[in-house]
Amino acid sequence: MARDRRDSYYWQAKSDGYRSRASYKFKQINEKFEIVNKGDTIVDLGAAPGGWLQIAKELSGGRIVGVDLQRIVPIDGVDTIKGDITAERTIKKIIKLVGEEGADVVICDAAPNLSGNWSLDHARSIDLVTSALECAKIILKPKGHFVVKVFEGDMFKVFIDKVRNNFTYTRAYTPKASRSQSAEIYVVGKKFLTSPVRIGDEFEITIKKLGSGGDGAVVIEGFVVFVKNVEVGEHVRIKIEDVKPNFAFADVIERL
Ligand SMILES: C[S@@+](CC[C@H](N)C(=O)[O-])C[C@H]1O[C@@H](n2cnc3c(N)ncnc32)[C@H](O)[C@@H]1O
């Protein structure tokens, strides 16, 4: 706390009426990545004391739901749940509040209890953010956005690859308001993918027609995949190289 008082964001939060200096981290992330649109439904995982909830409410004005192990002192127009984000019953409570249509944005600034042991804290953080990602995958609308705080370490890459596999656009970012000595980094996933194919998936297919750009076009479980350098009638094994919300691109890895 003594460290906070020497910090300009601490005083700025006090004068702006925000509950935490963390509010500015979410503000800066939103300024850079344009996460929130007016009217969005937003779910904040690990939300106490409520600084991010205040910003979410200001930016969206829509339905905002905050979840935390701790009680969140009520905020006008914000629903709160006291619960563990890793527990299934908490996810059910969230779904009840946001409705079956789902949320436009899921944000997570949750932090595990820190032990001071770097690798243990990193492992706990990875467990927590993996639960947050699983929760986001259940409650996000197609093309929804996800922001999550991670403590850096050797499992970071595996985690960000999981995010990358579920979103069209993924970046790691440290806002100015994060303390310079902090190990935290925010992962931003934009445009949640609900397609039946993923990068790295392989399929055996026959090219039945070419798309307007000259690539082969095949439909896999109702989803269009464009395949480069093929002719109509060719039977090939393909590997998915890139996935967009409404179509994917694949390369031929074997001509059969
Ligand atoms: C850094 S604070 C969040 C600050 C918040 N973004 C703000 O601006 O006020 C991290 C929060 O994560 C919560 N948390 C940690 N593990 C959790 C879990 N498993 N389920 C729910 N909340 C959790 C903690 O209780 C704590 O309140």
Image (spheres, grey):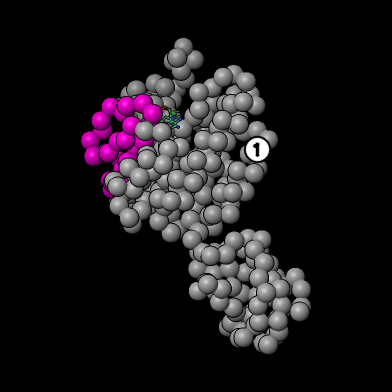
Looking at the image, residue 224 sits to the left or right of residue 201; the answer is left
Please name whichever residue, 193 or 176, is drawn nearer the observer in this view of the structure: 193
Asked whether residue 55 appears in the rendered view, the answer is no
Q: Which element type, helix, strand or loop, lies under badge 1?
A: loop
* Residue 155 screen position, x and y as percent: 65, 38
Q: Quadrant of the C terminus?
A: bottom right
Which of the 4 image quarters holds residue 201? bottom right
**Is 78 located above or below residue 143 in the figure?**
above
Give the amino acid type for the residue marked by disc 1 in the picture: Met
Position above or below: 242 against 1:
below
Residue furthest top as drawn: 2
- Residue linked to disc 1: 155
Q: Is residue 246 visible?
A: yes
Expressed as whole percent of the image width and height from the top left, the position of residue 192 reads 48, 56
How packed mark 1 is, by other alpha carbons closer than 10 Å (few <14, some 14-19, many 20 or more), is some
Question: In this orientation, which residue lies closer to the viewer: 54 or 237?
Answer: 237
Q: Which residues are magenta?
A: 57-82
Q: Is residue 79 magenta?
A: yes
Q: Quadrant of residue 157?
A: top right
| Residue at 58% from the left image edge and 68% from the top image edge | 248
